[in-house]
Image (cartoon, rainbow, N blue to C red):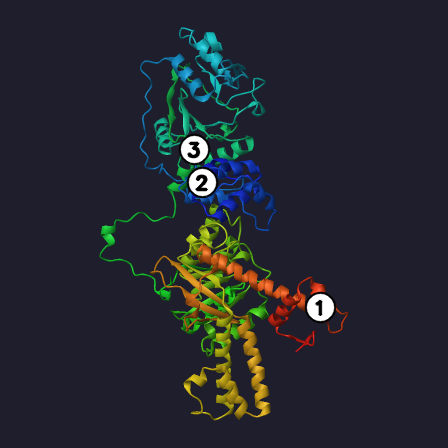
Amino acid sequence: MEQNQYDLLEVLQSIDPAELSYQDWVNVGMALKYEGYDVGIWEDWSRRDPGRFHTGECLRKWRSFSGSSSPVKGGTLVQLAREQGWTPPTDLGTPLGWDDAITEDGVVVDSNWVEGKEVEEPAHWDPVRDLTLYLETLFDSTENVGYVTQSFEKDGKYMPTKGSWDRTAGQLIEQLSHCNGDIGSVLGDYNPEVGAWIRFNPLDGNGIRNENVTDFRYALVESDSMEIEKQNAIIRELELPVACLVHSGKKSLHAIVRVDAADYGEYRKRVDYLYEVCEKNGLKIDKQNRNPSRLSRMPGVLRDGKKQFLVDVNIGKESWSQWQEWIEGINDDLPDPEPLEEVWDHLPDLAPALIHGVLRQGHKMLIAGPSKAGKSFLQIELAIAIAEGKRWLSWDCAQGRVLYVNLELDRASCLHRFKDVYQALGYPEKNLKNIDVWNLRGRSVPMDKLAPKLIRRAAKKDYIAVIIDPIYKVLTGDENSADQMANFCNQFDKVCTELGTAVIYCHHHSKGAQGSKRSMDRASGSGVFARDPDALLDLIELETTEALMKQEENKAICEACRQYLDAHFKWEDDLSQDDLCSSAQMLRYCKDHLDRWQMAALNRILDAEKARVAAMTAWRIEGTLREFPKFPPVNVWFGYPVHYIDRSGALGDIQPETDLPPWKKGAAKNKKNAEERKEERRKSLEEAVENACFGEKPTVDEVANYLGISHRSVRDRVKEHGGYVIEDGVIQMK
């Protein structure tokens, strides 16, 4: 099972299935299966939507989830929960590695200016209370505690012995409660000139080494190189998550800090992080105190006539995670909040428009659509429009320099594509200097590594737009993870900010029907994709009719005839306006006035135009804009290699199948099925005519017997087919 940042079962309970679309419900099941959960979990959760729940449906769908090269993962559940208002728990963060170093982030205290905070010795001291509270704060009652009351002299210094570790915190607290103030009767008598020590992490009862530590819960922060008042002030201003703060009886405070490490490895990393932050804030740490089994000064005893006492408990942040999050957020590069009143009369200028009514310079735009929508061609068209200062589809573009980052095509194909689009648009190549192409096929790197390379190369080029095609080549992480995709999208922000340029990129649709979804929900992966850019243009295919395609073919034939006649014949007032719009009339005119060689040449042109029209697809572009009002849907044709606006308005009457009301969806489906059945009848008749009489022309009776249908049905099929006739009871080609 993938180790997710969050408990996915907890996340799942925050999602209301009744609020999800069918596809989102399926995605939940796919994510659960990918993460290793049982189908029963999906089924139990789905029961919360009794209006749509059907027994056995979950299991049937579950069995169909057979794996994918781009699977739906646990991040999808997190995103769905976020969209329904779920707030994740505090992030525990990532521990630093041994070679990692913290930057100026984490500097909270200026030790040169910090004012000392006095540590008052208790006037009415209760040693037993101090030690009891210390034990209650740090340990569970069943955990073994290590302590030392005996010492020995070495080189003029008193050193602790190994001490004891055979009793639990509960046992010690119980015995202390009956000792009548005599700690020595419980722990053993100590030398009042030396004091006593205690270990702050629980032990297994078998020793005092690091391997005997059962829970890496606390670390010791101690500094004896500055005034104790200043130590106290810095510890508190740093808001260290201190469980117990103990006066050593001499010149230092012992802060027992919560680190809550899972194991020894994480303990080392967190202690390194803790000590580095302390050092940056002027607290000079005794780094010999790193070990989890380290001794600290025991509260409740005397040391050379001074009290080792408990100064405070549970100060600062409540946990390591809260403290680390706070530290890392204290010093950031974010601007300070500004009073609106101060800027109201002198607001900053808005960035100029790059695509008028759609996108400003320095902002981001995503073009989303299914395969075969011509997204790459659309971006090349945009690059050319900006370079030449022309219109792109329905919108005027600012003129300036563009960087086109090609990640998919080989160099030759990419450059030829630019020339093909230029020619198809009919633009003169006046500003080729405004387009730079960065060919990276086979050399692409993840976006977090590409961004600084791009910035370095583009720093002095004054690009007003950077187009990255396609982004799946530089995508890192799980595209269904909101956190990972937020980090990915941040790379575009870096490019925008550093270069002052717009960043434009495209991405594919998610799987399944798209027409019923909002435009921002069609892009594949986490909702971050669609919600992050300042402008989203979404393409959805329109289902054209035979009549509409005939209409487009008629227009293409008329235009081709017109252009040929312009080039090869004088015909100014020969045809009416109606005739100019009729392919039949235009062809009749050409046949009457052109010689056979000219007609042959024209026919070759017309064949190419018919093939082009047959390959055309129709698309609707919808937009979600952050800076501009929503624009009406734009209907376009994609006829290789360019898109062009539908000027006739015919596409405006077409609804995507999934946008139709239920009764129309059924009609469309029935129509499609009828067409399929007609094609099947046509093919079966052709097979019967060829094989019923072993290659000879068959009779109606022979075909009827071959197909197992009536004579009347055979005659109906021959009539429907249109390519056969029946003469004297024999079926033959027309």
Residue 216 lies, with reference to residue 729, above or below; the image says above
Residue of label 1: 701
Q: Is there any visible trace of residue 193 in the rendered image? A: yes
**Separation of disc 2 and disc 1 at Cα?**
65 Å
**Separation of disc 3 and disc 1 at Cα?**
106 Å
Give the quadrant of the N terminus: top right
* Residue sticking out furthest to the right: 694
Q: Please state which of the two labelled residues, at mark 2 or mark 1, is closer to the viewer.
A: 1
Q: Earlier in the sequence, mark 3 or mark 1?
A: 3
Q: Nearer the viewer, residue 11 or 156?
A: 11
Name the residue located 57 percent from the left edge and 79 percent from the top edge. 607
- Using the image, tell me which numbered label, if any, was put on residue 75: none
Q: What residue type is labelled 2?
A: Ile
Residue of label 3: 284
Q: What element carries label 1?
A: helix
Give the quadrant of the C terminus: bottom right
Q: Earlier in the sequence, mark 2 or mark 3?
A: 2
Q: What residue type is labelled 3?
A: Lys
Residue of label 2: 15
Q: What element carries label 2?
A: loop
- Position of residue 521 measured from the top left corner of the image (x, y, whole percent): 45, 53
- Position of residue 305 measured from the top left corner of the image (x, y, whole percent): 39, 14
Q: Which amino acid does label 1 sit on?
A: Asp
- Position of residue 373 measured from the top left corner of the image (x, y, whole percent): 51, 64
Q: Earlier in the sequence, mark 2 or mark 1?
A: 2
The quarter of the displayed image where residue 114 is located: top left
